[in-house]
Image (tube, coloured by chain):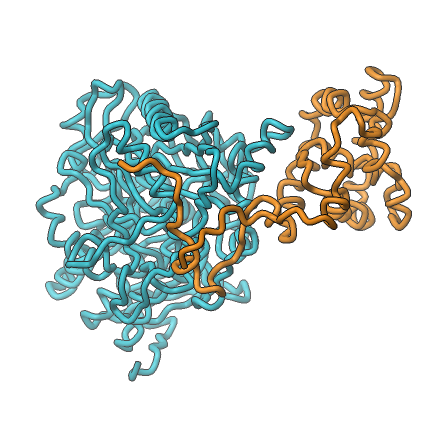
Amino acid sequence: MTNKLAKFDLNDDSVFVIIGSGAGGGTLGNELAQKGVKVVILEAGARFNIPDFVNDEWPSFQQLAWTDPRVASGSWQVAKDFPNLPAWIVKAVGGTSIHWAGASLRFGEWEYKAKTTYGDIKGANLLDWPITLAEMEPYYANAENRMGVNGTNGIPHLPGNNNFKVMQAGATKIGYKTVFTGNMAINSQPRDGRGSCEQIGFCFQGCKSGAKWSTLYTEIPKGEATGNLEVRPLSQAITIEHDASGKVTAVVYADAKGVMQRQKARAIAVAGNSIESPRLLLNSASSKYPDGLANSSGQVGRNYMRHTTGSVYASFERPVHMYRGTTMAGIIRDESTNNPKRGFVGGYEMETISLGLPFAAAFFQPGAWGRDFTSKLDDYPNTAGMWIIGEDMPQETNRVTLDGTLKDKFGMKVANVHFDDHPNDIAMRKHGYQQGTAVYQAIGATRVSEVPPYPSTHNLGTNRMSANARDGVVNKYGQTHDIKNLFISDGSQFTTGAGVNPTLTIVALAVRQGDNIAGMMTRGEI
Amino acid sequence: MTSRKIDPRIKVTRRNFLQSSAAALPAGALVAGGATLGAESAWAQASTLTPHTMATLTLMARDIYPHDQIGDASYRKAVAHWDTDAAASPAKHSMINDGVAQLNAESKKRFKADYVKLPDEASRVTVLKAIEAHPFFKAVRADLVVSLYNQHDLWPKFGYEGASAQLGGYIHRGFNDIDWLPTA
C-alpha cells in the first residue's frame, strides 16, 4: 500500500457513507473507491486480523458474533430454542463474510421470477425480481472472479474431505447425480495474494489461512489502498438524517467511546444485514417519514426470509471425523430445481456441515438432556452431517420491528425478529430431512438425527427490491424508491431468497450497484 | 501421511483404566452414583453454597449430561462457578437454594429421600423431569452445555481434536482418510 489511509472530516458532505462492511458494504466500498469516490464505511464491530481468529467455537463466537440483545418471536423453532439469538451473524469489520462457509452458487433463472413461476401461494407475498438472470450474469462472473470461486475461471475444485465422501457415497447410492465439492470461494490454489485451503476446519470462526474470501482481507484493504476509503470500526449507526426536501444528509453514530458523532454524506448505502438494516431505517423515523425512512410502501422490515433450513446428522459404525477440513465441503444439487410434485415449490441444496464438540452439544438438540441426547455426542467421531438450505416463502407478517421496550447500550431500540414457517417451508424441510436420512441410511448409518434450524445465518428480504414502489423498498439498483440518495446494499434487498446461499448474489448486486451509483454521480443525479 | 489415525480418543491404558474403572463396572455393582459423585466432602471448600447444595448440583450435572467416560472431577469443575456466582449475586444465591429445595421436595415426595441419596439414575431422572420446566433447572442445564463441553481436556474423550490451524490444518493429517466407504 503506497497511499496513506484516508481520513475524512465529519463535516465533509461529499463522502459516500456505507453502513456495514460485510459482503455487500465492503464490496460496494471497494468498488466506489476504485472509481474515485470518497467513501466512509461505518462498522459497528471491531477490526480483527487473521491472526486474531481462534479455532475454538465459544471464544470465537464471543469475539465475532453480534451478541447485542435481539428478540425472537413467532412459532419458529429458533424463537423457542434461542429467544435472544434469532441470528448468528458477525459484528466486526468484514461482517458475516468472516463467518460464511464460502458456498457461491448462482440463482436459477426462474428464481428471479418466483411469482411467475410459483403462482399464487396462499400466505406468501411473492414477487418477481425487477432484474433477470441475464442481466445479472456479467456481475456473477465478476463476483466469481474477484472471490476466486472454484469451478469458475479455471480454478480447480477443492478435494473432498471425509464428511463429503460419506455424503457423496450415500448420494450416489440413492441415485443423485449432481454431487461435487461445490463452487466455493475458498482458494484451492494460491490466488489473489491469498494462500490455499489447509483443510483447517474452522470456516465459521474466521479462516486462518485466508483461503476463504472475506471483505476483511480482500475488498477492504484494496479499497483502502486507493486512498479513497476510510473504514471506521466500533461505529454503530443510530439514525440517518435528512433535509427538508427528504434527501438523506448524515448518519448519527455511536463511536468507540459511545460518543454520538454525525458524519455528513452525499449519499448513504445501508448494508447492516437484514436485521440491522431495517432496524436503522425504522429507528430513523421523523416527522416527514413517520414510519421510518424509505417506508412509504410499509414493506421495510417485512418479508423477512431466512431460508428453509435443518440439518441431518448420522452415526456410523466407524470413524468419520467430519470436523476435519472444509466445513461446507460439498453439495448435492439434485433437489435444487422447482418440482412442485414433491409437495412444495422452490428447491433446496444439501451441503455438508460440521460442528465442533462444543457447538454439537449446543445445537444438535437444543434443550435436550439425558442419555438419549448424550449418546449422540458419544458417537461424535463417527458422525457425518449435512445442512439443508432451500427457498422459503416471503410473508408480510414475518418481519423485523423495533422492540417496544428493550434498548441496547446506546439507547437504540433493539430488533424483534418475528417468523412463522410457511406450510411450504415445512413441507420442504420434511422432504429434506427424508432425503438426507435416505442418503446416510444407504451406506449403513446406525442412527440418523433430524436437527432443527440454527439461529439464522441467511437473513434476507426486509428491504426488498420491486419494480413498483408500492411493493417494495428499493428499485432494481438497490436505490430506495422514496429517497434517491439512499441505497440498500445487503441481502435485505432480495425480493425472494432462491434455494442457494446468498453471498455470491449479494456481492454481484454490490458490484452492479457500484457501477450504477458511479453513473448516477457522473450524471449529477445524486 | 498414509496411516489413518482410526480413533483419536484416549487409549485405555492400565493406569487410566484403573482411574475410571467405576464407570466400567456393571450398574448393579456400583454403589449409588450418589454415594460418590454426591459426596459432600468434595465441596468442603465451598464458601457460599453448602456442600450439600454443591453435591446436588454436581450429581445433577452428571444426570443431565451423563457420559460414563467422564470422571466426577469434570462435573465438579462444570458447576464450581455457581458458588462464586451465588456469592456475587443474591438473586442467583436464592435461585440455587430454592431450586435445590424444590428438587429435594420432589425427590422426597416420590422416593422419601433427598435427590443425592437416590441410588439409581432412573429415579433421579424422574425427579429431574418433574422440575425440568423450572427456571432453576433451565439455568443449570443451559450453563452446563457450555461449562461441561467446553472443557478442552474432555474433548479427546469424544474424539474431537480441537484447534488445528497451528498444526497446519488437516491437509496432511487425515482430512480425507476415510477408508471404509463402499466404492461407487
Q: Does residue A231 lie above or below A143 as drawn?
A: below
Q: From where the camera sits, is residue A386 visible?
A: yes
Residue A298 percent across, percent down from the top left:
31, 35
Output the letter for the chain in cyan: A
The C terminus of chain A is located in which quarter? bottom left
Q: Nearer the viewer, residue A9 or A30?
A: A30
Q: Quadrant of residue A47?
A: bottom left
Q: Quadrant of residue A233?
A: bottom left
Which residue is painted at 26% across and 18% down in the image?
A343
Q: Does residue A160 lie above or below A48 as drawn?
A: above
Q: Nearer the viewer, residue A445 or A488?
A: A445
* B143 sits left or right of A28 in the view: right
Q: Does residue A453 lie above or below A423 as drawn?
A: below
Q: Nearer the viewer, residue A392 or B39?
A: B39
Residue B167 percent across, percent down from the top left:
48, 64
Residue A519 percent across, percent down from the top left:
12, 61
Q: Nearer the viewer, residue A52 or A175?
A: A175
Residue A378 percent across, percent down from the top left:
58, 37
Q: Quadrant of residue B183?
A: top left
Which residue is situated farthest in the left direction here?
A134
The N terminus of chain A is located in which quarter? bottom left
Output the letter for the chain in orange: B
